[in-house]
Image (cartoon, rainbow, N blue to C red):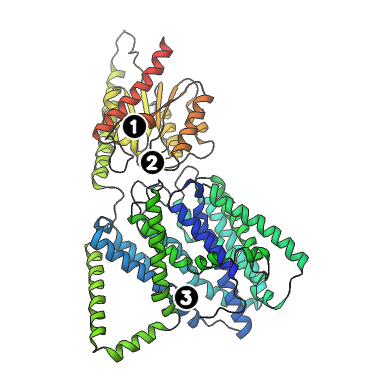
């Protein structure tokens, strides 16, 4: 296992930084709010290396042997993937059967390398989770890369046949890159969950193609043959170091809710990553040497296995719910990831990559009658039987726990019936021609997400003259549409209660836009959130700031109230149960009466 003479160890260092950022993001640590961008660095790096390899082969042989390229990629990628799928499937079947829900479909999608499109079709969120996500959700990025590996070699081969020289591919590659980047910007809707854009091959391709563009203008083989002047190398080192620092700052601070990220920001970050790669591939660059430190090289060389193993381990020990794990579980995550990665690297990935599979087949053909081989065969058949049993018994995927989902569906049905009763009552009141003045009781309009939906019955009982419109997954942008409709149909009361924030942080300016639409004549009550997710403080701070900026805006502190009362939530720790719903409605009622009573007095 000798590395090529021009093997670029600094790129292993970049892989290490990427996978470390992703792990801490999946562990939900605030200092890695942008750790998911580590996947973007993987994309840019993959685009560079694969395109560089293909162009080298074409210049050396005047063709690209696609029949050899794809088997090489499969030998590199499939053994570790299949091992993870098998081990995870067997473990869940034996010890954690609750995770069997949806596992069969996820495994099939992973085997076909279409996980990203499968999660898009299932409307799964990468960012907003009210229950543990699929243990295989992280395989969406491998699906994007594998789709690229299947199509891109043919595109490069065809392009080189037409244009002859790699540099002439720059313009069509730039067109593909810009189309993908523009698609992300056009499809992005502020305030809505951006998971479709995050998962989509079409909206993530620009990072990979950007790496390919660097390969045709800055090929690694050039630096294996030429010496870069010291002065120029120093300048490039400085530029690359600044770019790397900006990327690392992005790993720390760049929240996935930022509008800028989907309106070109991810392209800017990809460009910074491109600069870093361009500097690292220069021989003897100081940045390359820094990233070639032995620990980084070790992690980077095994980053594929680390990425495969870490996520299911995090989920299976209780992570993936938006809050950091206890320190001892974090230690366990790293220990188990290390053990699984090392075992896979030494006994699965490396042997298969260098011809071990054919040797193993030959060995079993020769020694199939021996006792050791027969015992091994029995163990393998037993493992496969357990895995198959799990796949057969796996249930179809659900969005939430059965109890909570049933409760939300029932609440939605009751909410619709309550709206019908309210409309009927309103029509009857309009028909009455009484001389006395209409009731002075204020009409309360309530708009919220699934938390309010879970408590809609109790709210209706607390405020008889109430219009409630709550729905699962609602964002601020959805609430604006609902309130516009209510205003048009004269459903907006003197008091407006808004309970949002369970599904993510508010985009910049959205709360101000909503308040402006409601106007100064109404009293607006925002219910803050107790959701156990990293964005809770961002949501609550935004609402607190709005209360300070507007005299008719008030915050009802559900966050504090919920923490003072035991047993008010379902198992997800977000949605109030039956007792919690009554308490939730009472907290809102008390908050409104405290303000309206002060105003009247």
Do labels 3 and 1 touch, CB within 8 Å?
Answer: no
**Residue 377 horizontal/vertical position (percent):** 25, 80
Nearest-to-viewer mark from 3 and 1: 1
**Residue 443 horizontal/vertical position (percent):** 36, 21
Going from N to C along the chain, the mark reached first, 3 or 1, is 3
**Residue 60 horizontal/vertical position (percent):** 62, 84
> Can you tell which mark lies on residue 73?
3
Quadrant in the picture for the C terminus: top left
**Residue drawn 54% across the image and 52% down it:** 251
**Residue drawn 37% across the image and 57% down it:** 332
Left or right of residue 178, residue 399 in this image: left
Q: Name the residue under label 2.
A: 532
**Mark pair 3, 2: CA separation:** 41 Å
Nearest-to-viewer mark from 3 and 2: 2
Going from N to C along the chain, the mark reached first, 2 or 1, is 2
Query: Can residue 58 be seen in the rendering of this structure?
Result: yes
Left or right of residue 409, residue 517 in this image: right
Q: In which quarter of the image is residue 500?
A: top left
């Amino acid at each position: 296992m000798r590395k090529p003479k021009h093997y670029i160890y600094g790129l292993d260092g970049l892989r290490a930084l990427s996978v470390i950022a992703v792990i801490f993001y999946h562990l939900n640590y605030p200092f890695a709010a942008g750790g998911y961008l580590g996947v973007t660095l993987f994309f840019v790096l993959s685009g560079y290396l694969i395109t560089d390899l293909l162009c080298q082969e074409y210049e050396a042989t005047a063709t690209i042997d696609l029949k050899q390229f794809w088997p090489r990629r499969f030998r590199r990628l499939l053994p570790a993937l299949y091992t993870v799928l098998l081990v995870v499937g067997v473990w869940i079947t034996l010890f954690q059967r609750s995770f069997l829900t949806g596992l069969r479909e996820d495994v099939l999608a992973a085997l076909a390398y279409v996980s990203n499109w499968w999660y898009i079709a299932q409307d799964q969120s990468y960012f907003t989770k009210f229950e543990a996500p699929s243990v295989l959700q992280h395989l969406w990025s491998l699906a994007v890369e594998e789709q690229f590996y299947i199509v891109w070699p043919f595109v490069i081969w065809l392009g080189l046949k037409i244009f002859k020289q790699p540099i002439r591919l720059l313009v069509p590659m730039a067109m593909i890159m810009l189309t993908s980047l523009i698609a992300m910007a056009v499809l992005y809707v502020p305030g809505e969950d951006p998971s479709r854009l995050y998962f989509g091959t079409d909206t993530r391709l620009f990072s990979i193609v950007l790496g390919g563009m660097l390969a045709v203008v800055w090929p690694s083989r050039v630096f294996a043959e030429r010496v870069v002047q010291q002065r120029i190398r120093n300048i490039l080192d400085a530029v690359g170091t600044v770019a790397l620092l900006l990327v690392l700052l992005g790993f720390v601070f760049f929240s996935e809710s930022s509008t800028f990220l989907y309106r070109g920001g991810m392209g800017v970050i990809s460009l910074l990553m491109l600069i870093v790669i361009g500097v690292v591939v220069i021989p003897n660059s100081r940045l390359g040497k820094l990233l070639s430190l032995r620990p980084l090289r070790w992690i980077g060389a095994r980053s594929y296995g680390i990425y495969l193993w870490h996520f299911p381990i995090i989920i299976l020990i209780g992570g993936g719910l938006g809050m950091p794990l206890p320190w001892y579980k974090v230690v366990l995550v790293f220990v188990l990831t290390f053990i699984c990665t090392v075992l896979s690297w030494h006994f699965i990935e490396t042997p298969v990559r260098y011809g071990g599979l054919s040797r193993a087949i030959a060995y079993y053909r020769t020694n199939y009658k021996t006792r050791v081989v027969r015992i091994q065969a029995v163990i393998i058949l037993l493992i496969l039987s357990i895995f198959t049993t799990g796949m057969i018994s796996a249930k179809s995927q659900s969005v939430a726990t059965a109890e909570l989902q049933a409760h939300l569906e029932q609440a939605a049905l009751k909410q619709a019936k309550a709206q019908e009763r309210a409309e009927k009552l309103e029509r009857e009141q309009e028909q009455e021609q009484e001389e006395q003045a209409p009731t002075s009781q204020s009409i309360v309009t309530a708009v919220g997400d699934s938390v309010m939906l879970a408590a809609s019955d109790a709210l209706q009982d607390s405020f008889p003259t109430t219009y409630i419109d709550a729905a699962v997954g609602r964002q601020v942008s959805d609430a604006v549409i609902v309130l516009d409709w209510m205003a048009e149909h004269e459903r907006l009361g003197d008091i407006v209660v808004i309970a949002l924030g369970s599904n993510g942080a508010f985009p910049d300016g959205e709360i101000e836009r909503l308040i402006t639409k409601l106007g100064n004549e109404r009293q607006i009550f925002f219910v803050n959130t107790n959701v156990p997710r990293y964005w809770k403080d961002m949501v609550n701070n935004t609402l607190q700031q709005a209360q300070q900026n507007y005299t008719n805006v008030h915050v009802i502190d559900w966050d504090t109230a919920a923490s003072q009362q035991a047993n008010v939530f379902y198992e997800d720790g977000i949605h109030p149960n039956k007792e919690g719903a009554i308490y939730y409605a009472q907290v809102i009622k008390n908050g409104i009466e405290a303000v309206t009573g002060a105003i009247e007095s």
